[in-house]
Image (cartoon, grey):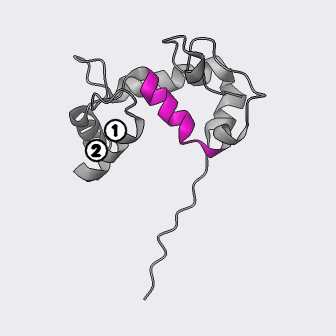
Amino acid sequence: MDLDYLLDFEDYFPSMISRMGAEGFIAELCNGFRLLMDVNKGLITFESLKLNCYLLGLDVRDDELACMLMEGDLDGDGALSQMEFCILMFRLSPCLMDDGPNKMCTPQGACGGGGDPMLMMNVM
């Protein structure tokens, strides 16, 4: 018996942006970050991600959690800052990444931090 491991992925970010506007969408991403972060460190750590996955009823292996963190960890500290989290969310949204540079960028980067133009993300 062959198993089909392909999953359909529906990217809800574009519809969220159209309903909430760019600023509302960014605010929701930042709320998601705060949900997953370690409140003492202000970062999403392996431990905070593992705990929150458990609390949300998700069965995620330790190696999968480590890969999630490595995917978004731009500064190599083993955790995700708010900026890294928001950038990762944009990168994982096929529709947002396909929309190109003709769309609106947030002036302060994805979640209001930093001013590096290379980190500005296409929102709409």
Question: Residue 96, relative to residue 111: is it above or below?
Answer: below
Reply yes or no: does residue 6 show up in magenta.
no
Label 2 SS: helix
Residue linked to disc 1: 69
The quarter of the picture where residue 55 lies is: top left
Question: Residue 58, relative to residue 44: is it above or below?
Answer: below
Reply yes or no: does residue 91 show up in magenta.
yes
Residue linked to disc 2: 66
Looking at the rendered structure, the kind of residue marked 1 is Leu
Visible in this render: residue 106? Answer: yes
Where residue 48 sits: x, y (%)? Answer: 25, 32
Name the quadrant of the C terminus.
Answer: top right
Contact flag, marks 1 and 2 (Cβ < 8 Å)? yes
Residue extending furthest toward the right: 102
Looking at the rendered structure, the kind of residue marked 2 is Ala
Q: Residue at x 62, y 42 (%)?
A: 12
* Magenta-highlighted residues: 83-94
Q: Residue at x 56, y 17 (%)?
A: 109
Which label was assigned to residue 40?
none
